[in-house]
Every structure is written in structure tokens, then in C-alpha cells.
Image (cartoon, rainbow, N blue to C red):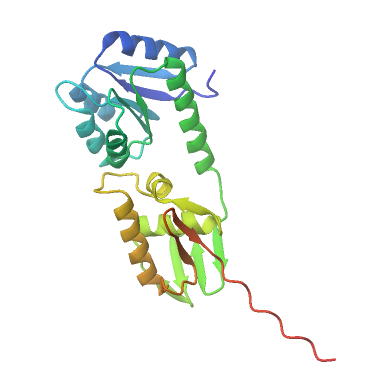
Amino acid sequence: MASETKKILLVEDEKPIRGAVAAYLEREGYWVRGVGDGQSALEEFEKHTFDLIILDLMLPKLSGERVCRAVRETSDVPIIMLTAKGEVEDRIIGLELGADDYLVKPFSPRELVARVRALFRRAHAEAEPKMELLDFGDLVIDISSHKVTVEGTEVDLTASEFKLLATLARYPGRVYTRMELVEKVLGYDFEGYERTIDSHVKNLRAKLGDDPRNPRWLYTVHGVGYRFEAPAAPAEPDAKE
């Protein structure tokens, strides 16, 4: 059973699927509101505060894509997208629209419940307190105040640039793929995925004064993605005897 009552909006036009999924979720202790078209989905979204949305792509009245775009204009509520299409491009489109996960039909309701649990666990982990100040000498990242300084001078970053930098800097040395950074940083509708991350990194480097040919902090891992490196502290001079 779920430790607390989570509210889920289930948007699926096929009534048998909607009923089966709702039954599985309710058995787990979730509160479920099921609707069969995109327009009703947005109406319910306006009425209630949901903890998660399960959204079919192919819907009457208003498509799942349009529903997802509308939701992402005002909310970062987790979204699991359901699609009858299994092509890679369709999955990428779902993620680009702002979905947090996807499931291809036909699927097992038990697998969907497992995905729901995983998303709630991830959301809980991200909500836990983390290190508030990342101090790398010349570069200081204050997580709580969304403030970044380079050599004592504050740098003006966009929300996405700040989240990108904080994501990389929390785990120096770890390599993030471009798709991982898309999922962690770009939780809204945007065009292109790898190209967008590259653009954000380029802008971030320019603002930090980090030369990509001789980087201090942001390193490109060719064919994979990016990593952050904390500069080694200068060696202490030998004490004179």
C-alpha cells in the first residue's frame, strides 16, 4: 500500500484499459480520477491538485501532446505517457514534450504500477535536503539561493543553466549523457534534445568564462555527454626547516 494517498489523473480513452489500470492503482492505495478525452483531462487538472498524470497520446477532442503542453505551462507534475507506437522517435517526442516516463501499449498494469512507484520514489529523493553550498574555490554554487559566483563576481544564469550546472557539479567526475541531462534539466516543451543541451552548455561556459579548449570545470566527453571536474587544490609549499 502507498504510505500516503497520492492523487493520480488517468487519461485513457479505451474504457477497459482505463478500468483495469484504475483498479490496480486503487489497490495500491492511490486515489484515481479517470477520464477518456483530452478536454476532460484539462478540466480535471484545473479542479484538483494531482501528484501524477498518466496520459495516453491518442485521445479524442484534444490530443495527449496538446494536453502535455498545456500542463507543462503551469506545472512540473510527473507525467507517464502511454503510446501505441514503439518507434524511438515517438518516445523522444514524448520526452521532449515534458513527459517523465513512457510506456508502450500493450503493457501490463503491474508494470505501470511499478513505474508509478519509481517516479514517486524519485520525486521523494529529489525533495530531500541536499548539500546547499558547492564551493570549488573560484566557482561557488549556492543551491538554496540559486546564486553562482566566479572569482567573487555573481554570474547571471537562466533557470535551466543553473539546474544544468548544479546537476553536473553535485557529482564531480560523473559523466552524464545528453539524454540524462534532458530528463533532469529540461522538464518542459522544447525543440531538439541533444542540440538543446549543447546550446545550454555553450552558453554556460561563456558566462562562467570556461574555455572548452582548456576547461576548468565543464568537460565534453565526446560521443557521450558532459562531466564536471573540481580543480585540484594547489599544493602547499614545503615548510622551511
Taking the image as shown, residue 69 lies to the left or right of residue 158, namely: left
Residue furthest front as drawn: 223
The part of the image, by quadrant, that contains residue 108 is: top left
Q: Quadrant of the C terminus?
A: bottom right
Residue 192 lies, in percent from the top left, at: 26, 49
| Nearer the observer, 1 or 13 | 13
Q: Is residue 133 visible?
A: yes
Residue 91 lies, in percent from the top left, at: 31, 34
Which residue occupies 31% across, 48% down? 193
Q: Quadrant of the N terminus?
A: top right
| Nearer the observer, 161 or 75 | 161
The part of the image, by quadrant, that contains residue 66 is: top left
Q: Is residue 144 visible?
A: no
Taking the image as shown, residue 192 lies to the left or right of residue 151, namely: left
Residue 201 lies, in percent from the top left, at: 37, 62
Residue 182 lies, in percent from the top left, at: 37, 47
Which residue occupies 34% across, 44% down? 187
Which residue occupies 54% across, 56% down? 170
Work out whether 134 lies above or below 150: above
Taking the image as shown, residue 131 lies to the left or right of residue 17, namely: right
Residue furthest bottom as drawn: 241
Residue furthest left as drawn: 61
Taking the image as shown, residue 191 lies to the left or right of residue 221, namely: left
Tally the numbered discs: 0
The part of the image, by quadrant, that contains residue 25 is: top left
